Amino acid sequence: MNPELRFTDVVAQARPQKRKDDIRNFEYSYRAEITSIYPLTDKETLYRIQIVDPDERRRFSFVPGQFIMLEMPGIDEAPFSISSSASIRGEVELCIRSVGNLTNFLPRVRRGTHVGIRGPFGTGFPMQQMHGQNVLLIAGGLGLVPLRSPIAYVLENRSHFRDVNIVYGTKSPAQLLFTYQYEMWRKDDIDMDIIVEKADQSWKGPVGLITDPLKDILSGRDTEFYYNTYAIVCGPPVMFKFVCNMLNEFHIPMQKMFVSLERRMHCGMGKCCRCNVGSTYTCLTGPVFDYWTVMNLKEAI
């Protein structure tokens, strides 16, 4: 691959074939089953969903950063970021917060409930492009949900990366997701910083903004570190500006920063027009973009 070629250029070149694949995925629904339900917080629940047919299970695959459409027949359908390892065929994990028709109905379901899955859709994070580089994995709030899949990729291919740092921030300790995995992530020569904006009586860690530990990680590094570093940033759009601007101040190229606009996803095929930013449909060209492209998409964040 030409090193001067931006991520969005690669996506554009691959778009005709991707469009055909997306149309095929859009039309086909996998019959799937909820195999486990695990409460993460008072508002978020992790659902593990497995495709029922063994042959379809072997054929189904995705890359970190993509999303699927989940359907409860007779209730509704909605897009969700895949929050599990891409190495596990025919199975996905979805972390879902109750906010709409489908998500408010899901707490009533039990293991064994059948659902429909369409996809996967959208672009993913260019993980192979990051081989041999330092990686910053930065999440705010629910942003850890789409970030969990690239974290799994890094863990499974740890020898392909240099320094790896996870930075995670939430408003309060009660909102922390996947707390049972933090020590496992740290054991594989990965540094993880967790910070909350407001502590409770049980919280013994740092209090502040997510940019606080990020600045500590970046300060005092040599030029080679910044040039050889990729960043994946997931979270509320307002966070992108502060985090990515700080990365840019430390001379990490915008083309090496990747963000997910997964919050804009709706139909997954650019038909409802609810995800468009100007003339760009984020469900077709995204949801993953390099930050240079995002800066040139008016009102993207």
Image (spheres, rainbow, N blue to C red):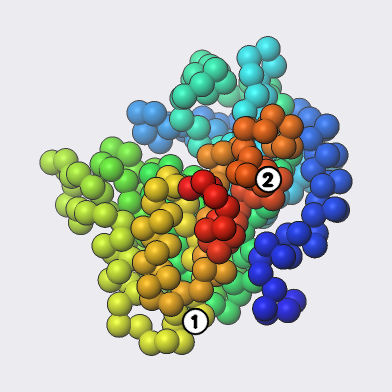
| Camera-nearest label, 1 or 2 | 2
Q: Establish if 88 lies above or below 275.
A: below
* Crowding at mark 2 (Cα within 10 Å: few <14, some 14-19, many 20+): few
Identity of the residue drawn at 43% across and 54% down:
240
Can residue 12 be seen here? The reply is yes
Dot 1 amino acid type: Tyr
In this orientation, which residue lies closer to the viewer: 288 or 145? Answer: 288
Marks 1 and 2 in Cβ contact (< 8 Å) = no
Q: CA distance from mark 1 to mark 2?
A: 32 Å
Question: What kind of element bears circle 2?
Answer: loop
In this orientation, which residue lies closer to the viewer: 53 or 288? Answer: 288
Q: Is 202 displayed left or right of 58 in the figure?
A: left
- Expressed as whole percent of the image width and height from the top left, the position of residue 145 reads 49, 45
Q: Is 199 displayed left or right of 109 in the figure?
A: left
Question: What kind of element bears circle 1?
Answer: helix
Can residue 51 be seen here? The reply is no
* Residue 279 - label: 2
* Crowding at mark 1 (Cα within 10 Å: few <14, some 14-19, many 20+): some
- Expressed as whole percent of the image width and height from the top left, the position of residue 285 reads 69, 50
Identity of the residue drawn at 57% across and 69% down:
255
- Expressed as whole percent of the image width and height from the top left, the position of residue 230 reads 52, 70
Q: Is 292 displayed left or right of 163 in the figure?
A: right
Please give the residue where the numbered disc 1 appears in the rendered image.
227
Dot 2 amino acid type: Ser
- Expressed as whole percent of the image width and height from the top left, the position of residue 58 reads 79, 46
Q: Establish if 245 lies above or below 147.
A: below
Q: Quadrant of residue 182?
A: bottom left
Identity of the residue drawn at 13% across and 41% down:
201
Q: Establish if 247 lies above or below 167.
A: below
Q: Earlier in the sequence, mark 1 or mark 2?
A: 1
